[in-house]
Image (cartoon, helix red, strand yellow):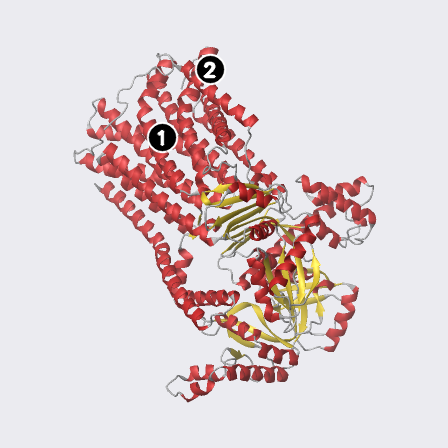
């Protein structure tokens, strides 16, 4: 079986149509980026994220309201994968000082409710933990269990046969958990994942991500400039910019539109962007390789004819590879689970634009460049 | 034909290697399944017998059971070491990035930390570095200069001629040392805690990255990591008292076990009877038969059993009465037979003579006279006085250096040390001496570390992710293969075999290099399947074109491969470049993705250019053509 056998389309002649298409989508995307922006995950913003799995489907609005009246300001809530899972996010990485007395009395309430006979004396309270001196070791295991049922994490430190220390951690995620447990006594939930990133680290990750993308663009520019011509390299990098911004625009436009598609920008999504760069480049290089070959063979033919010939000849390969890769990505999108969904979505868009841009941005740029500067490119 | 043979040989070898490298992963998967089944069976029995067993106790018993089942058969452990390791996102666990609290460290290093100007400058620098990424040391040094003061006013490294920049670089060095100290201490603790396959390493100059699989209690893990190190100097209990005490422990332990019936049962082997009658002495072997020293050897795998005994209230009572403590060495050594690992156990006074805060510095160096590594340590004035008294009263005795309840060395006191400057010899290597230096400094400068990033994945989410990853991989493989066979017929079959080969080699290489498979890593494998066929597609399309120009079979295959080379190489190199950058930039899971993607690409090149090539050439040499749709 073969498709595009003896294809003969004047791609270069129709390039103005594609300028329009690209511009429309890009402008649409840029408007979205400026108006709607992105939602950054805590990787880049800093904060705390908790993923909860409920026994039954959970109402997100209700959950958001409940999570927002525990003293941490408004807490973001989203579905995570399916209706029974939710992701909660706050910008706090430590409990605010004014909340600490409240947290302490809550901890003591939880202990007193089950073990009123246990005597405890406060040793220390900091922003991250409270520790008590407890006089009955026998009850300690039970106390730790009761605290964990109430959403707090605790540990015991037995110093000798009678005395022991009890340390209760005061993390933001613990406070969210205990706040929800208190308000949702009927629904049971488990913590599947909890993540905390200090804003400073978030800033570093963001800077690293930008560097990584910039660096890969530069290295590709140099490599292709060396292997082909500088005009080819510039066209390829321009195509990459086209792909990145187009995908970013679509990311922004789709953000929050589809309930099961969580398009937060995370480290994994940046990984997807770098992969997209790799794929788009791979596709562009295959077309360029053929252009280079034909330029050596048909020295007298005008560049647009050569380009059309090369693109038509490589079209079946372009489509088949894009198709098999899209199969893989679609499989990830459907079966890969919530964690990989935004990653797969990014690549799904990226593979389509990457294939498109090899022809209508990268190749066209080389043609425009050669026509406008009236320079003949030779290999 | 000879050429074919060699190539065939290489390819069969590569296939065999792939299977060989992946076998441990497969075997481990089966073993883990068996062990889990056994553990849950026994777990049920425990619950039945003791319905109100506490959760902690229950879990710790199951963990111990799992450990002993794992160790039961050495081949299980061997396979486990060679399997593909799963990332934290797939097996559940905790990822922590800790940062050294440099301001606190500087405060400790400062000569006069209560100086108001110093306090002000330090807190200013601390606030400033919170928002910028500058180093606290350089900011503080700049501020001190701006205040027209010299660094030597606050920091003294024993050299009065030191310039500001000398001191600044010394301080940076101290910061780095603090990180390596923290790594050392945390590793020891994590190992003692029993986390399987932890990964602890320093990152940059002030961070430590910890990966703790299977841990889900933040509180316990952070406790482990953040607790300040406790360094103590302890004297030994007199051997006669020590032996009486251990006899008592032995009796108490024997009394609680059902010893009577076992003793009468003559069919049991001697050693078993011995274990029943003397549960303690059967584990602890006396090193010095003349009983001049009370040290014992315990088989390393039995150390936990002994520690468990020591936790019992009746045993504790005996120890408390004697004011003693049983403490293990930090290393194990090979027994005379060269196989069994033994760990030394010491009987020490429970009360420390001195704690590590008095130490001001420690250095490991070669002793020029004896040509042996030695560690020297200095103490502050208060420590010097006490140390003089202690050493004076105990010449000829041993003194143990105990960090976090583990003995690092126990040298003999040779003479009274009046100056506070002591030298510890007896380290077997410079490396060992270095560790001792770190340990001694740990008491001097406990380095406070704070969590910057912490991510915990629960085991259930991990299992879900594994299933999702496996499903995606399988579906991806099947659909891509079916499409290729549908489109290219026999050529598709070759591509399918190549794809299988690519996956086999990718995973095999991952196992061989101890790579870690993460969820994004699985995505990398799935994605590289889609991209791997690209090389085949390029070649096939080219062969079709060449055939269309009327070339012969052999010539078409030849030029089909030859003409595709440049496109295949250039396109894969650019993808590899982004892969390398991604690997450099990424952390944990994303690195896993970059790794599998890169390995997958290289493997796919091999499969297209060598494997497919061979098959095509073979048929072409026979005048047959592999049908390309």
Residue B37 in the image: x percent, y percent?
37, 63
Give left or right: position of B434 versus B340.
right
| B465 relative to B391, above or below | above
Q: Nearer the viewer, residue B343 or A278?
A: A278
Residue B131 in the image: x percent, y percent?
68, 39
Residue A119 in the image: x percent, y percent?
67, 67
Q: Which element type, helix, strand or loop, lies under badge 1?
A: helix
Which numbered disc flags the more N-terminal residue, 2 or 1? 1
Q: Residue at x 81, y 53 (%)?
A: B114
Q: Callout 1 environment at 10 Å: few (<14), some (14 to 19), or many (20+)? A: many
Q: Residue at x 66, y 40 (%)?
A: B133
Q: Quadrant of residue B602?
A: top left
Q: Callout 2 environment at 10 Å: few (<14), some (14 to 19), or many (20+)? A: some
Residue A117 in the image: x percent, y percent?
64, 68
Q: Residue at x 39, y 60 (%)?
A: B32
Give the spatial CA distance, label 2 vs label 1: 27 Å
Please identify the quadrant where the C terminus of chain B is shown: top left
Is residue B436 in view? no
Question: Are dots 2 and 1 in contact, CB under 8 Å?
Answer: no
> Which residue is denoted by mark 1 in the rendering?
A322
Q: Which element type, helix, strand or loop, lies under badge 2?
A: helix
Q: Residue at x 44, y 45 (%)?
A: B519
| Subunit ID for the residue under disc 2 | A
The label nearer to you, 2 versus 1, is: 1
Q: Mark 2 and mark 1, same subunit?
A: yes
Q: Nearer the viewer, residue A172 or B231?
A: A172
Please identify the quadrant where the N terminus of chain B is shown: top left
| Subunit ID for the residue under disc 1 | A
> Which residue is denoted by mark 2 in the rendering?
A369
- Of all residues, the one furthest to the front in this rendering is A186
Number of numbered discs on residues:
2
Give left or right: position of B512 versus A31.
left
């Amino acid at each position: 079986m073969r498709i595009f056998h003896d294809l003969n389309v004047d791609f270069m002649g129709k390039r103005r149509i594609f300028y329009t298409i690209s511009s429309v989508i890009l402008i649409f995307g840029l408007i979205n980026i400026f108006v709607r922006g992105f939602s950054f995950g805590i990787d880049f913003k800093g904060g705390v994220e908790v993923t909860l799995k409920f026994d039954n489907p959970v109402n997100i609005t209700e959950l958001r309201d409940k999570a927002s009246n525990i003293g941490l300001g408004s807490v973001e809530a989203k579905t995570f994968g399916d209706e029974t899972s939710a992701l909660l996010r706050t910008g706090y990485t430590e409990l605010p000082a004014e909340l600490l007395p409240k947290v302490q009395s809550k901890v003591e309430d939880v202990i007193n409710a089950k073990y009123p006979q246990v005597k405890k004396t406060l040793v220390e309270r900091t922003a991250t933990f409270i520790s008590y001196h407890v006089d009955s070791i026998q009850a300690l295991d039970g106390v730790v269990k009761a605290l964990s049922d109430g959403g707090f994490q605790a540990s015991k430190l037995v110093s000798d046969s009678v005395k022991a220390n009890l340390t209760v951690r005061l993390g933001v995620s613990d406070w969210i958990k205990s706040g929800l447990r208190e308000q949702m006594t009927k629904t049971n939930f488990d913590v599947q994942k909890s993540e905390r990133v200090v804003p400073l680290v978030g800033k570093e990750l963001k800077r690293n991500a930008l560097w990584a993308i910039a660096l890969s663009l530069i290295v590709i520019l140099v490599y292709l400039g060396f292997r082909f011509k500088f005009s080819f390299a510039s066209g390829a990098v321009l195509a990459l910019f086209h792909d990145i911004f187009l995908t970013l625009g679509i990311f922004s436009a789709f953000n929050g539109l589809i309930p099961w598609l969580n398009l937060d920008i995370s480290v994994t999504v940046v990984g997807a962007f770098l992969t997209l760069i790799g794929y788009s480049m791979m596709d562009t290089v295959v077309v360029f390789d053929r252009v280079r070959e034909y330029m050596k063979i048909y020295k007298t033919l005008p560049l647009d004819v050569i380009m059309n010939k090369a693109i038509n000849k490589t079209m079946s390969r372009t489509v088949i590879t894009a198709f098999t890769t899209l199969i893989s990505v679609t499989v990830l999108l459907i079966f890969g689970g919530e964690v990989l969904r935004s990653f797969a979505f990014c690549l799904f868009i990226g593979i389509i634009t990457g294939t498109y841009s090899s022809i209508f941005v990268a190749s066209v740029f080389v043609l425009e460049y050669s026509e406008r500067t009236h320079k003949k490119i030779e290999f | 034909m000879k050429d074919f043979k060699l190539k065939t040989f290489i390819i069969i070898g590569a296939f065999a290697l792939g299977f060989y490298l992946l076998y441990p992963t497969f075997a481990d998967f089966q073993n883990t399944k068996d062990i889990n089944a056994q553990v849950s069976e026994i777990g049920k029995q425990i619950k039945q017998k003791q319905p109100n067993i506490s959760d902690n106790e229950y879990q710790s018993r199951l963990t111990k059971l799992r450990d002993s089942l794992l160790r039961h058969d050495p081949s299980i452990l061997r396979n486990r070491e060679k399997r593909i390791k799963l990332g934290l996102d797939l097996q559940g666990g905790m990822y922590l990035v800790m940062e050294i609290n440099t301001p606190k460290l500087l405060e400790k290093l400062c000569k006069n930390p209560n100086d108001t100007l110093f306090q002000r400058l330090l807190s200013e620098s601390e606030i400033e570095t919170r928002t910028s990424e500058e180093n606290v040391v350089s900011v503080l040094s700049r501020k001190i200069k701006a205040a027209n003061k010299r660094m030597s006013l606050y920091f003294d490294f024993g050299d009065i001629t030191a310039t500001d920049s000398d001191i600044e670089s010394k301080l940076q060095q101290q910061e780095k040392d603090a990180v390596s100290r923290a790594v050392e201490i945390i590793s020891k603790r994590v190992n003692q805690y029993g986390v399987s396959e932890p990964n602890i390493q320093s990152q940059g100059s002030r961070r430590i990255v910890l990966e703790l699989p299977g841990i889900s209690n933040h509180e316990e893990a952070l406790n482990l990591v953040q607790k300040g190190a406790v360094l103590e100097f302890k004297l030994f209990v007199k051997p006669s008292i020590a032996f009486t005490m251990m006899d008592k422990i032995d009796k108490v332990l024997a009394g609680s076990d059902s010893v009577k019936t076992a003793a009468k049962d003559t069919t049991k082997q001697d050693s078993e009877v011995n274990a029943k009658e003397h549960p303690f002495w059967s584990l602890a072997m006396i090193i010095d038969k003349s009983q001049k020293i009370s040290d014992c050897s315990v088989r390393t795998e039995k150390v936990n059993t002994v520690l468990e005994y020591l936790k019992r209230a009746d045993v504790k009572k005996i120890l408390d009465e004697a004011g003693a403590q049983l403490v293990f060495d930090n290393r194990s050594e090979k027994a005379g037979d060269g196989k069994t690992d033994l760990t030394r156990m010491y009987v020490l006074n429970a009360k420390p003579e001195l704690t590590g805060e008095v130490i001001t510095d420690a250095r490991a160096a070669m002793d020029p006279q004896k040509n042996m590594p030695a560690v020297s340590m200095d103490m502050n004035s208060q420590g010097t006085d006490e140390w003089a008294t202690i050493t004076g009263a105990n010449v000829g005795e041993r003194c143990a250096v105990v960090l976090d309840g583990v003995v690092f060395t126990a040298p003999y006191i040779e003479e009274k040390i009046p100056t506070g400057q002591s030298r510890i010899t007896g380290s077997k290597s410079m490396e060992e001496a270095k560790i001792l230096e770190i340990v001694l400094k740990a008491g001097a400068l406990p380095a406070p570390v704070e969590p910057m990033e912490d991510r915990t994945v629960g085991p259930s989410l991990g299992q879900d992710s594994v299933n999702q990853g496996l499903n995606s991989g399988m579906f991806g493989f099947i659909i891509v293969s079916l499409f290729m066979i549908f489109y290219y017929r026999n050529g598709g079959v070759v591509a399918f075999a190549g794809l299988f080969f690519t996956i086999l080699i990718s995973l095999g290489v991952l196992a061989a290099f101890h790579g870690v498979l993460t969820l994004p890593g699985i995505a990398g494998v799935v994605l590289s399947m889609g991209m791997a066929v690209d090389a085949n597609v390029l070649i096939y399309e080219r062969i079709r074109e060449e055939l269309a120009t009327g070339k012969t079979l052999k010539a078409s295959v030849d030029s089909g491969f030859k003409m595709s080379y440049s496109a295949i190489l250039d396109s894969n190199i650019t993808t590899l470049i982004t892969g390398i950058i991604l690997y450099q930039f990424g952390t944990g899971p994303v690195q896993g993705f970059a790794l599998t993607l890169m390995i997958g690409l290289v493997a796919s090149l091999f499969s297209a250019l060598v494997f497919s090539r061979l098959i095509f050439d073979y048929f072409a040499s026979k005048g047959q053509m592999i049908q390309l749709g």
